Amino acid sequence: MNKLTIFIHCHNRPVYARRTIESVLNQTNRDFHLVVSDNSSNDELSDLMRAEFPGLDYRRRSSSLSALDHFNTNIAETETEYVCLFHDDDLMEPGYVDAMLRTIALFPHAVAYSCNAQIIDDDDLPKGASFESGHAHVFIESPRTLAGRYFSRFPNGIAPFPAYIYRSDIVKKNPINHLTGGKYSDVAWLLEISKCGLFAWNSEKLIRYRIHAGNDGGLESLRDRLRLLGYLKKNRSFVGQAIINDFRFFLYKKLHKSGLAGREFPDKFESYFSSYLQAYRLRRFIKPETYYYLSNAFRKLFK
């Protein structure tokens, strides 16, 4: 019996979805169950599935499901020990499943696993790696370590969200909650899962992660950023005050650059934001990790 279920989350992108499905079917290790989960508002993917992939496990969802409800629905339906919730605009390299199952075998006590990715654009042109590491595996041992990867000044990148494989018993007990960050709830959810145990990241680029105009992450939401800040503050004991300071700097800087500060807040807050950013920059320059990062960066230049 398969130990891994791969759900492909689809929504109104049949051209991308076809390529994603083909990349999953092209795995060198076929020890998994594939489900195409269609949350589209039209019948284009449904028609494509009947014509080109009639034998696959295809599940049509109600178009009224939100993206997060779609996510939780698939978690609830998982019957295998592990589950992967893949996106319909990304691609698996042929060795993804094989390499990830080997990673699971190496670190069976971990609760979640992911890998590196080649970032690509709409034209499949490479744009760099998702994270940097000189080791075969990266270990995330706590919410603070994971939050640092997302929000601290020199985090060396993150594992891409769609590449994750989870222990299904863990994620079934911890459904994603939109109140923790709205459209950024995936970050809060990963932090919740990291409270349960170790994350193991494989440093190989085993997927291609697409950045394009249709990415939801490209649309900024101030309200949801503030929700995420609220989540971090409630979890100060797990993430630490330094992470909250780093995220607040990131948020205030974004407000200034986008002009949202002037539109969304009274003038007195504009002054507060400016003072906070200046004080943060001064504190940052006396931190040892700043100079550690700069020395490593110079070393890379002269390799």
Image (cartoon, helix red, strand yellow):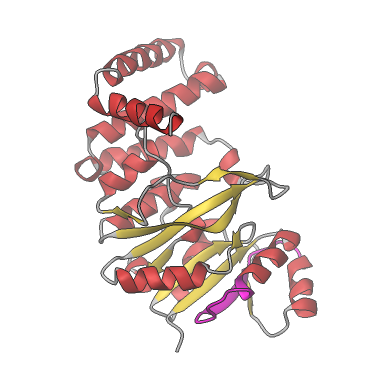
Q: Is residue 298 above or below residue 101?
A: above
> Residue at point 30% right, 14% down?
282
Is residue 75 visible in the rendered image? The answer is no
Q: Nearer the viewer, residue 28 or 143?
A: 28
Quarter of the image where one finds residue 22: bottom right
> Residue at point 30% right, 28% down?
245
Q: Which of 221 and 244 is in front in this view?
A: 244
Percent x, y of residue 24: 60, 71
Percent x, y of residue 270: 44, 13
- Specify whether 225 is left or right of 230: right
Q: Can residue 26 be found in the magenta stretch?
A: yes
Q: In this view, does 207 lie above or below 218?
A: below
- Specify whether 203 is left or right of 213: left
Q: Can residue 288 be found in the magenta stretch?
A: no
> Residue at point 59% right, 46% down?
216
Q: Is residue 139 above or below residue 291?
A: below
Q: Is residue 2 above or below residue 40?
A: below
Q: Which of 285 and 191 is in front in this view?
A: 285
Percent x, y of residue 147: 33, 43
The residue sitting at the bottom extreme is: 1
Q: What stretch is highlighted in magenta?
A: 24-42
Name the image quarter holding the N terminus: bottom left
